[in-house]
Amino acid sequence: MRNYQLEMESYLEQLRSRDGVPTLLLHSCCAPCSSYVLDYLAKFFRIMVDYYNPNIFPQAEYERRAGEQVRLVGEMNARAKRNTVGAGDVDAKYERRAGEQVRLVGEMNLNEVSVRVADYGPGAFLDLVNQNQELEIAPEGGARCAVCFRLRLEHAARAAKEGGYGCFTTTLTVSPHKNAPLINEIGEEVAREYGVTFLPCDFKKKDGYKRSLELSKEYGLYRQVYCGCEYSMRERSGDKA
């Protein structure tokens, strides 16, 4: 069985011998999961956080999660900057749209991070699910989730290609409830399709999930009680109708 954590560490070690700071497009499923991943990877990359999750239902939930994503990056920036230059020197303004630059600097030598939040567009996900009635009744973690993973990773691969990023990856593997081998398999497939590099990952390893919980508490992040789509919300509430 492949050890994706070790594969990622090997890739990161190779970066140390290269000049300049490489770039990474990071698909983020939510702020809590991205907290640990940013804390880890911003030491190695300039990162674009790509918040694209058309599976999330309803719109108010999407907006809340997206807002937490932007807030997290901003507060990580402010905290790191305070540790370096003192609280009085912080002047942070953040936008939710493409191109916003959020600087993460300070005691951990974190590199520049940008945030891009897609407009709410559930049709991309629902159109795929509605094509196959079996997906509507699939259990959480089953075939419907695989379709959802592919949709979001295809978007990330395309964005990485168009933006000229050195590689891309996703925060999805932080969760112990997500199938990391499947996510990596899909990530590598779409990477080949678009001619880009997928950074293998299993971020829950080495206490990554535990660290995400700690960071979520530190930043007071909203932690959702269901994965995101209306089907997972129904399953959570016990309504399978």
Image (tube, rainbow, N blue to C red):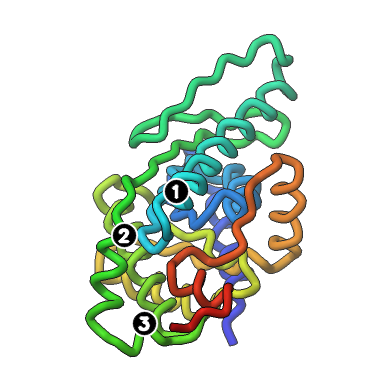
User: What's the amino acid at mark 3?
Assistant: Glu
Look at 69% across and 10% down and name the residue there. 88
Q: Nearer the viewer, residue 51 or 108?
A: 51
Instruction: Count up the numbered dots.
Output: 3
Of residues 118 and 140, the one nearer the viewer is 140
Callout 2 amino acid: Pro
**x and y, in percent, of residue 42 in the image:** 58, 43
Circle 3 sits in a helix, a strand or a loop, which is it?
helix
Mark whose residue sits in front, 2 or 1: 1
Badge 1 marks a residue whose secondary structure is: helix
Residue occupied by mark 2: 122
> Quick one: quadrant of the N terminus?
bottom right
Whole-number angstrom distance, CA of label 2 to CA of label 1: 12 Å
| Cα distance between the residues tagged 1 and 3 | 22 Å
Q: Amino acid at mark 1?
A: Ala
In this picture, residue 222 sits left or right of residue 139 = right
> Could you tell me residue 44's position as x and y percent?
57, 46
Q: In the rendered image, which quarter contains the C terminus?
A: bottom left
Measuring from the top left, give residue 156's x and y in whole percent.
35, 57
Give the crowd class for mark 1: few <14, some 14-19, many >=20 residues within 10 Å. few
Residue carrying label 3: 136
Q: Is residue 123 depicted above or below 216 in this figure? A: below
Other-residue count near label 3 (Cα within 10 Å), few / some / many at <14 / 14–19 / ≥20: some
Q: Is residue 30 above or below residue 152?
A: above
The answer to which of marks 3 and 2 sits earlier in the sequence is 2
Residue under the point 64% across and 54% down: 223
Farthest residue toward the top?
88
